[in-house]
Image (tube, rainbow, N blue to C red):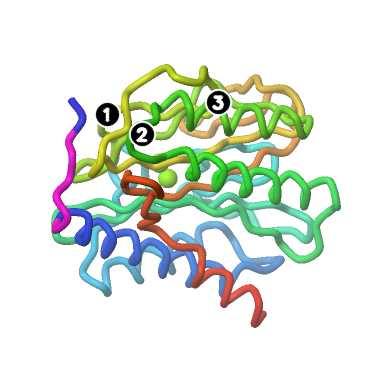
Amino acid sequence: MIYLKTDEEIELMRVANRLVGETLAEVAKIIAPGVTTLQLDKIAEEYIRDKGGIPLFKGYKGFPNALCISINENVVHGIPGTYPLKEGDIVSVDCGAKINGYCGDSAYTFEVGEVSPEKKKLLQITKEALYIGICNAVEGKRIGDVSHSIQVFCENNGYSVVRELVGHGIGKQMHEDPEVPNYGKKGYGALLKNGMCIAIEPMINMGTKNVKFEKDGWTVRTADRKPSAHFEHTVAIRPGKADILSTFDLIKQVLENK
Ligand code: MG
Ligand code: MG
């Protein structure tokens, strides 16, 4: 069941996604070598609760924290812990928040200090892939058009697309229909309609597309332990151009002034 949102609901989703963008910017401020992933999580949870929101991931199917933090070969769903960030790491921070009954979901992969040119390129291409997907997320196209555009762009750059994890519809629930894979066929899948809200989230690997699920029950890592990147926006389908409800602008401001 795909729920189309009214204009009023989309504005509420924008508020929730703004909160997520602000939270990711707070995290961006303190990312540095030596900082533990649990410290990032604490900052995020406090920020969300101070603003009257609820961290969406905490307690979701038993997930213990507010953020999913996935370093280097970890693709997504990493559990914050005592690991201190190291110079050269790449860190995917995925954040979800609910406020006024609506959900926001967005992820950004950060660089810790100076990272290798290979990792930098992986991040750049994954972020670009997200925006290419968003360009295809317009009324009248299909989910497969979004999926295909992301897959082709990443594979043409020599990277691979994770199959086991996908984007999703979002609204009053964090995960609604339809699924939004990062691979697929043009012209296939659900028709995109005005008012649909979806989270588009390419998870792109430097090496093999294959992943393994760690024994902690959550962390997903690449099978060959090569790095993986993840960027996510929540968008509303509109005619002509998607409305991006989440934002990286605040993160950008923080990183430029660091
Ligand atoms: Mg997310
Ligand atoms: Mg998501």
Q: Position of residue 224 (x, y in %)?
A: 75, 24
Sequence-wise first label, 3 or 1: 3
Q: Quadrant of ligand 2?
A: top left
Say above or below: 33 vs 172. below
- The residue wearing badge 1 is 177
- The residue wearing badge 2 is 168
Q: Assess whether mark 2 and mark 3 are in contact (beta carbons under 8 angstroms).
A: no
Relative side of 202 to 210, left or right: left
Whether residue 60 appears in magenta in the rendering, the answer is no
Q: Position of residue 100 (x, y in %)?
A: 14, 60
Is disc 2 placed on a helix, strand or loop? Answer: strand
Is disc 3 placed on a helix, strand or loop? Answer: helix
The amino acid type of the residue labelled 2 equals His
Residue range corresponding to the magenta coloring: 3-8
- The residue wearing badge 3 is 148
Badge number at residue 93: none
Is disc 1 placed on a helix, strand or loop? Answer: strand
Q: Position of residue 219 (x, y in %)?
A: 53, 34
Residue at the spot 22% in from the left edge and 55% down from the top edge: 10
Say above or below: 247 vs 67. below
Residue at the spot 68% in from the left edge and 33% down from the top edge: 154
The main secondary structure of the magenta stretch is loop
Sequence-wise first label, 1 or 2: 2
Crowding at dot 2, Cα within 10 Å, few <14 / some 14-19 / many 20+, comes out as some
Residue at the spot 36% in from the left edge and 27% down from the top edge: 179
Callout in the foreground (3, 2): 3
Q: Assess whether mark 2 and mark 1 are in contact (beta carbons under 8 angstroms).
A: yes
Is the CB atom of the residue marked by disc 2 within 8 angstroms of ligand 2's nearest atom?
yes
Relative side of 53 to 183, left or right: left
- Spatial distance from mark 1 to mark 2, Cα to Cα? 6 Å
Whether residue 7 appears in magenta in the rendering, the answer is yes
The amino acid type of the residue labelled 1 equals Asp
